[in-house]
Image (cartoon, rainbow, N blue to C red):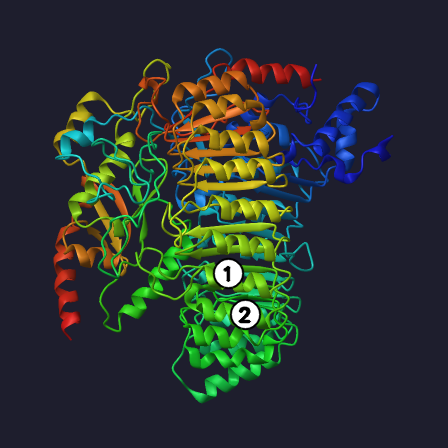
Amino acid sequence: MSVSIKEHDYIGLSEANMEKQAYEMIYNNKDLNLKATELRLGLPGSESPEREVVVHGGAIKIMMAGAKRGFSDAINGGSRKWAYAGDGGQEVGSVKHSGQETDVSVSPVPALPERKTQVSAKPNRQISSPAPKQQVVGWPPIRSFRKNTMAVSQTKNEEEGDQKMGSGCLYVKVSMDGAPYLRKVDLEIYSCYLDLSSALEKMFSCFTIGQYGSHGVRTREGLSESRLMDLLHGSEYVLTYEDKDGDWMLVGDVPWDMFIASCKRMRIMKSSDAIGLAPRAMEKCRNRTEADNE
Amino acid sequence: MLQVFEARLFELVTGEIGSELVAGRIVMAISFREEVLEHSWYAIEWWCQRRIFIGNCYVVSLAMKIRRFPEVRSVELKWKPHFADFNLVPDGWGGYFYPWICEMARVYPLLEEIKLKRMVVTDECLELISKSFKNFKVLVLSSCEGFSTDGLAAIAANCRHCCMLFASWNLRELDLRESEVEDLSGHWLSHFPDSCTSLQSLNMSCLASEVNFSALQRLIARSPNLKTLRLNRAVPLEKLSTLLHRAPQLVELGTGAYSAEIRPNVYSNLAEAFSRCKELMGLSGFWDVVPSYLPAIYSVCSRLTSLNLSYATIQSPDVTKIVTQCPNLQSLSVLDYIEDAGLHALSLSCKDLRELRVFPSDPFVADANVSLTEQGLVAVSEGCLKLQSVLYFCRQMSNAALTTIAKNRPNLNCFRLCILEPRAPDYLTLEPLDNGFGAIVDHCKQLQRLSLSGLLTDLVFEYIGNRAKKLEMLSIAFAGDSDMGLHHVLSGCDSLRKLEIRDCPFGDKALLDNVSKLETMRSLWMSSCSVSLGACKRLSQKMPRLNVEVIDEQGDLDSRSDNSPVEKLYVYRTVAGPRLDMPSFIRNMDQNPTCRRYSLEKLFSE
């Protein structure tokens, strides 16, 4: 009997018991804001690698399993390569992913073994300096804190009136009502609202469509067929953002450049909650233009 | 019999499970247990355990670590994979601290220190911390996220309810290094009560909001033991001298924005304040530098051992002027604005330099904006005889330069080179950089950490596998031709603990031929490689003590064929089975998690 990796349960308490206690403690704690519907524990025999329930910061949230793509395909026109436009993406190690849309925070589809070692000359890319490079997710390996800090520094330098250089990236958080966690997107990657919205739809579609196949677990908040149809056809959700003044605006109401210059974070909210945002956007646009002209 | 178990023996450094040292402890512990029946296992542990360090996520489940150990004083947890720093790990992956703190609050009443790295920490967690431990002293949140300044307010205020019971408040260290904080306001700092006089270290440099300056001033004034103070960008330069006057004992200072209108009295106040700081050895901060104010720090330069100018967008002459005045410098972080000329000057002035980090000022621009090349690093390797640790971003490299560096500095233990362009060849010969990196691993026999870049074939991995016997952490990107590359590394690097790979043509065969190696390592990350879903399943079958997690945000993992490539793979050893908090886009390949978990239970229950 090998003992080297037979890690013992020092505690001697049954592991499942302890976790159960932990979760129950959280679940039962009335002080916490729980959106939980059902607490699923690892009972023998019904174990599945999928977890529908996650403990996250005190609230038990529902994780939707089984993302489907139908939603975004219906809304979106064609496929878009969001960051690998132009020269086939050879230079920065991306591999063509045959027309599939990619989630913005996912690196490209795996490299295929047929790539050869080439003594390559500098790969073709935009030569006009200082052109911003095509961006690969996570490359070069620089932390977000540093990237964002440098981006702010560069903006300050640019106020001297130099030509605008790509400052690299601008990560903003995107939350969606009812989704268990935030996502982050780099606004610098997109050139227009259409790109941004299709990327977000891809990213969040897995939250809007709940699936419970064989596991026999239901949630009270699962979406029904009819609601799914609403999503496909209607605008159940709208995209909003918080600008530098702290106001919440509808995305799309101001020119793109103004948007990325002022967007602090975004929120996908239910249409019903978004009433009243539109008129302020117009006013803002007007005010900003006036300020710029002073 | 209790003497056999020193207090340190039960330090569960789970990253080293496979290594002799810890395995030896565990084996001994188990056999001891079998021998000594009348002493309960728990009694021994109860007596011994003081410090818990868990170096990788989920290796042991929550339940197995948390128990009634009144003695635990310090907990250190590192969670997400390193590549999470570069946005390769999707949000929602895991790493939630909340379940841990709930249990710890219950069973570790004497807890004094919590140090977390790459975890999701919420305001609820911070509140719990603030209320649960009467002796709490140290909180370090490194690259964490999920909390806001409201949570910090709770930490700052925490003894409101207990200051009636205790004479003074205990917080000694609050360090938020590079965490992502939702910055609602600067008011949190004002929550430190007047009775708090114990602060030794405060690092708030990652926060954006302005804090109440007079609250900050008063806090500093009543903290005679304050040694480390890292301000955030919003603290204006004009006010820095006021703070320094109240803390002349500081050993490490991070300034706020280092810019102000040019005013002689501001300058002279600042220079005078710095000159009074006789203990100051480390400087950082320096956002938005106005060069005219730099000479204010000259009086401390001769004492400085650590200088971080990596946010200072100042040009080469200004940087050079500073660093050449720091003969005792051991650690330097700069932007590539320093250029080769500055590095050359550094190599002549700073003979005690141990660590150099050069960051890119404009990484996303194709052509070089500064004159920093491989020559700068060569110069430093020649002049700085004690140089051990290098992180260098540049745009060109050659085999010749790497070989020179290797021969100059065989004492290197950390070499991380990032050539900005993936697969960039030797710019002189247009060949791969295999020989250059080969020289590095050949000469630097103590090398523990290596990051590769540039054009590399399988040959470099053969060199690494054959020569890098002390290598513990290896990072690979856009390199190699085939599976043999990975095979060389897995079969050759005896000390390997962490391996992270992205965008390389490494696939199933190398992985499956080296499964037992994986159990000796802390973790393996592979993204955008050629590993198939089927191979992941087979790996998991062969190695039940590994968690094989497939991350795939495309969805439909369940309907994929076994031949399809996985986006991201994360493998780590565990005794706890699949973790419970995986989001929907992650699958554990373990087919029989239930059975395993319950068999462990059976084995160790009493």
Mark 2 or 1, closer to the camera: 1
Towards the viewer: B414 or B291: B414
The numbered mark, 2 or 1, whose residue comes first in the sequence reads: 2
Comparing B26 with B522, the one in front is B522
Q: In this view, does B386 lie above or below B317?
A: above
* Residue marked by disc 2: B346
| Chain under disc 2 | B
Element type at mark 1: helix
Q: Is residue A238 something one can see in this rendering?
A: no
The residue labelled by disc 1 is B377
Secondary structure at badge 2 equals helix
* Left-right relation of A175 to A19: left
- Extreme residue in the top direction: A45
Determine the image quadrant of residue B314. bottom left
Type of amino acid at the residue the image marks with label 1: Leu
Q: Which residue is drawn at 34% across and 40% down?
A: A118
Chain ID at mark 1: B
Left or right side of B247 for A101: left
Q: Is residue A81 left or right of residue A148?
A: left
* B99 lies above or below A285: above
Q: In which quarter of the image is the N terminus of chain B?
A: top right
Q: Measuring from the top left, give residue B438's x and y in whole percent.
A: 53, 44
Q: In this view, does B156 lie above or below B344?
A: above
Relative height, residue B326 to residue A273 (above, below): below
Residue B86 lies, in percent from the top left, at 41, 46
Taking depth in this image into account, of B331 and A44 the one nearest to the observer is B331
Identify which amino acid the numbered label 2 is placed on. Leu
Residue B167 location (% of width, % of height):
69, 59
Q: Choose between B533 and B30: the one closer to the eye.
A: B533
